[in-house]
Image (cartoon, rainbow, N blue to C red):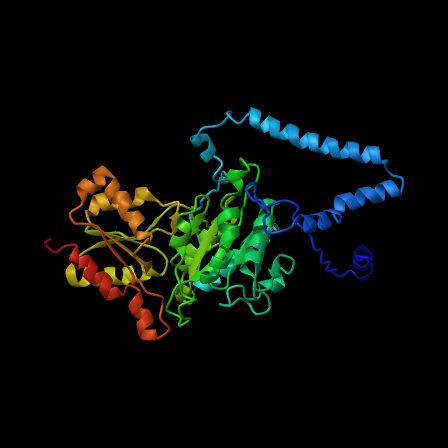
Amino acid sequence: EAVDSIRSTGRPFFLEVKTYRCCGHSKSDACLYRSREEELEWESRDPIFLFSRVLVERGYFTEEEVAHLILEGRKRVDDAALDAVAVRDMHINLEQAMEYLLAPEDEEIYKVCKSTTRISYRDAIREALDEEMSRDHAVHLIGEDIGVYGGCFRVTGDLYKKHPTQLHETPVSEEAITGLAVGSAMLGLRPIVEIMYGDFATLASDPIINHAAKIRFMSAGQLSCPMVLRAPIGSGTGHGAQHTQCIEAMFANIPGLIIVAPSCPGDAKALLKSSIRSNNPVLYFEHKSLYNNLGPVGDDQYLLPIGKAIVKKRGKDVTIVSYSHAVTTCLEAAAVLSLQDEIEVEVIDLATLKPMDKDTILRSVKKTGRLLVVHDSPEYGGYGAEVVSVVTGDSDCFAALAANPRRLCGKESPIPFAPELELAVIPSKEEVVEAVRSLFSPA
């Protein structure tokens, strides 16, 4: 009936099938929560049993042949189990196993940017999406309200007109959206998921953490997951505590993920293009307060390498390491320090949080002898601790320190709705200036 309906109408057919788990959910489950009578009732409805009975009744098989097939199937399972036991002591070492964590990347040629236009962070992301969908029809955009509405923050705009077969609007289910992307990536597509607010990525944490990040490792390299999850993060837009969190540190602890957080339009476009071309799952965090910021953006050939920090300002006296929206704050503070204190700050934009570009950080701190790490997310368990540990864990860099490294981070608080409180939670230009000055004060 279902097949006939689908063929005649061309429309989906919903079939509800009630099933029963014939054994416990684990080997230690004694099934004490159900009776033997209940189990026997469901065993009589076992579709394998019913199907085999129909085959016998219609003369396709004899009862003996059906019994033989069942025994043959059980033997295949038993033989496979015995094979597994026989080779259980044959193993690879951890170093070899780790090679399955991330898929090798295709070699890209990073060309010097020859032409630029001045557009917004929002439009830069849209350009990257447009160019990559045009370049590769395996690139698909999936998410809520990304079609006619143009996206919650108007990032996708009218891309639905230009790429109608590559842009898919979905119901409101972050877990389903991301799960769909993981499956399609495993089958050869390059999906880009738009999560309306980064906070809602918590609802997609299972497919991100337990599937996208692990599938290549668990399949010994047989499967990969080349997908991008775009998530708007951060405060400053009055969206309240459940729509303004910076959640990058939550995912940084998961092996198998790449994490990108660009701070300006040019980097946003170039890094998104590189993320889409990556053969691994990438979390791409775009800060809502940056969407209207203008800046030079490269042409369709310009890419930035994932895993490389960007020195936004050269300096000799102190190193500030930051990422995303906080980079703008740090650059403003650096200008004040240069003018008022004659302190020349070197501002490093991590751009990629995972993998971290340790070499650029160490090289800078060995030169300046002072380190301040700034980010909008809370200090406890935050990314800044990783940066400090890199510096203090390197003996040469540690020896070069003229002051204890400092962190300046968001307050240990949900983001308030009231505008004055919202701004008070994250580091300000004035706080960055004072934090840098403290690195030059006598202990």
Q: In terms of depth relative to the viewer, which is nearer, 266 or 164?
A: 164
Q: Is residue 252 above or below residue 16?
A: above
Q: Is residue 176 left or right of residue 302?
A: right
Residue at 58% x, 46% y is 25
Residue shown at 60%/49% (left/top)?
184
* Number of numbered labels in the structure image: 0
Foreground residue, 369 or 17? 17
The picture places residue 30, in percent across and down from the top left corner, at: 58, 44
Q: Let me know if residue 102 appears in the view.
A: yes
63 is higher (above) or lower (below) than 375: above
Q: Residue at x 83, y 33 (%)?
A: 64
Using residue 304 as the reference point, say whether residue 19 is left or right of it: right
Q: Outermost residue, right direction?
A: 59
- Expressed as whole percent of the image width and height from the top left, the position of residue 178 reads 55, 55
Residue at 75% in and 35% down: 70
Query: Where is residue 176, by image quadrant?
Result: bottom right
Q: Can residue 298 be spotted in the picture?
A: no
Q: Quarter of the image for the N terminus: give it.
A: bottom right
Give coordinates of residue 54: x percent, y percent.
84, 45
Residue 36 picture location, percent across and down: 67, 48
Q: Is residue 348 left or right of residue 433?
A: right
- Foreground pick, 45 / 37: 37
Left or right? Give the position of 110 relative to 402: right
